[in-house]
Amino acid sequence: MLATLLFALALAQPAVTTIAVGGTLDSPFLRNFHRPEQNAETSFRWSQPEAELVLPGVGSSTTVELRLTTGHPGTPVTLNGGGESLLVETGPGWNAVRLLPQAAPGSGDVAIRISAPRQSSPDDPRPRGVALSHVVLRSDGGDVPWVQAGLLGLSVALLTFTLARTSRRPALPWVAGGMACAGLLAALLLDGGAWRPYLTIYSGRLALVLLLTLLMHLAAEGLLAWLARRGWLATAAAKPLAGLAALAFFVRLAATSYPLIFMLDPRYHLARASLIPQGRFLELFLPNQSLTPQQWNAAVTIPYSPFFYLLSFPVTYLPQPWDRLAMLAMGAAVDGFAVLLIGCIAVLGGLGRRAAFFAALLLAIMPYGLWWAVSWGLFPNLLGQCLTLLAVAAWLRLYPRLHERRAQLLLAVTMTLAYLSYATSMMFLGVTWLLLLGLLALRRDQALGPTLRAGLWAALAATVLYYGWHVPALVSQSLPTLLGALGGSGELKGASESAAPPGLAQLIGVLPLRFDGLLLLLSACGGLLLLCGDRRRETGDWGQHSALGRKAASVSRLRSPVPPLGGLLLAWCLVYPIFALVDYYVPLVEKQAMHLIPAVALLGGLALAQLWRGRWGRLVASAILAFFTWQALSSVVFWVVVAYAAEK
């Protein structure tokens, strides 16, 4: 309530805002306008014969000045701001037209409809109305858009309440809520209110994103509490992991919602998911060359599982743009649950709660992970990554009793889900599983046989449920085409010109570009710590002087051997060089680097946990985390600006 009153007072202050049409930040306010253009004098956009200017939360005491032209003096232009229409005959050059539109009660929203005779020319066949260059908003103040103030106040309340459920320090939520309130007030008042429309146009979406974040936190909290009751992890680890899952969800959804992200993938996924309610599921299920993913850049049939579309097709019943927002929320939720799983993997592997927290935090704010979720939106790939983590967590948890048929069946089910989620997930998890079997054989581990049987059951189930239906098309067309191209006897149609060069250059060159060097160094240190810890564990030398020994004691309550997490991660990381060295025409290297993201976060979290043990190490770890947090925030701001610029 206090925040709402403060926002109401701020919105009632006089303000002057200029929207440069044709610039970077004009797209949220324009409807039915063509792409931006520039001449020697100014930037502008041509409207269609019927267009609209949307100005949220400006209030009824705001004068709107439009700078426009039709290119033909004497052309009539009709402007309607909610009351009587204003008819204007344009003169030569740019014309300044002022009007006082009527605002919607409570919200203060204004919509100005622009109508002009249709014009076109042989060199520009677009249907055009008027050219708009600038929109200037001058508010005299006094008018309070209470709906806008309430939405902003609700956003502060949701943020404070979510943090209160996560933080162990009672003062932190209030401090964070106060800082958020101060930041929003600054956005409303700085530069004479010049930035006010850029906040008020998304005030409702900000409140919705924060509400969904709270729901995500509650869902994660409930899931972790259930896992704690079943003995998967300690209750003390549940609360911070739920908060980190909510953080990952908020960062990704916020970055793709202001405005709705420009990337094509959500629209592409919606178009495919809409085939299911139309009764055209078989077009997704059976081999269909027209549905080959574009990133393969190959004129062959590639198995592309409809699993993601079966999960997401209910969002197609929502009206636009809510269907796209729901699709983005699903992608953010998948990444949030991946953060939960990486924390569970760390605890189940014997690394302790602190390493689990740092690993989950790194996965939540890692700039490369944000880049994938925000700029590409390959949500089936993200789902495959999350389900792969679920299979890994299941193997770690079931390792002590894999001799039981029920445990093997449960592991096979989780692996089948990962196999069905995405074709590359099947490739990566399948090769990881084969490498893990080899390492278990070298160790003469008793889990070898059960792990082998569970993997075979999963491969058989995935083949029967989906991939087997593609065998004829793969044998007759796809494999001969791909193998012929790799052997030099053929060439793939539309092979990507941007694909990285094959071989060692591809292996070495991509990781430093996609991962920060500091993060790679942390992960390497964590890998050494983990491998040394595994050797001590095998020989029984887990003395109290060993940090990993004390962490491993946290899982002694299971009264079962601790699984070889080091060997599992070694198999996981070896998948990248194997595929990077054989990729040629099909540029999978980006997906390989994405496959490494959870392992990098897990190993980096272990290194940070070790640093945190000493006084100076704690300062170093805090500085490293602050650096990564700054990178994440910069990435989010960058993609928001890019989305504004690209939403043309």
Image: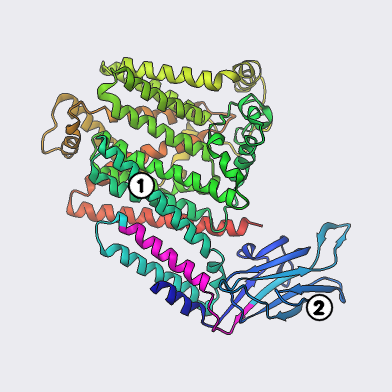
- Which range of residues does the magenta coloring cover? 137-164
Left or right, 114 with reference to 551: right
**CA–CA distance in space, label 1 to label 2:** 58 Å
159 magenta-colored: yes
Find numbered disc 2 in the image and state the secondary structure of the residue it sits on. Answer: strand
Residue indicated by mark 1: 362
Residue type at the position of mark 1: Leu
Q: Residue 88 carries which label?
A: 2
Quadrant position of residue 279: top right
Q: Going 52% across and 67% down the picture, which residue do you hit? A: 199
163 magenta-colored: yes
At a point 36% along the width and 30% down the height, the residue shown is: 392
**Residue 379: image location, x then y, percent:** 52, 40
Q: Is residue 354 visible?
A: no
Q: Quadrant of the C terminus?
A: bottom right
Front one among 51 and 608? 51
| Element class at badge 1 | helix
Q: How crowded is mark 2: few (under 14 residues within 10 Å), some or many (20 or more)?
A: some
Query: Measured along the vertical axis of the image, is residue 103 above or below residue 121?
Result: below
Q: What label sits on residue 476 in the rendered view?
A: none
Q: Nearer the viewer, residue 18 or 515?
A: 18
In this picture the colour scheme is: rainbow
Of badges 1 and 2, the one in the foreground is 2
Q: Can residue 105 be seen in this view?
A: yes
- What amino acid type should be assigned to the residue bearing mark 2? Val
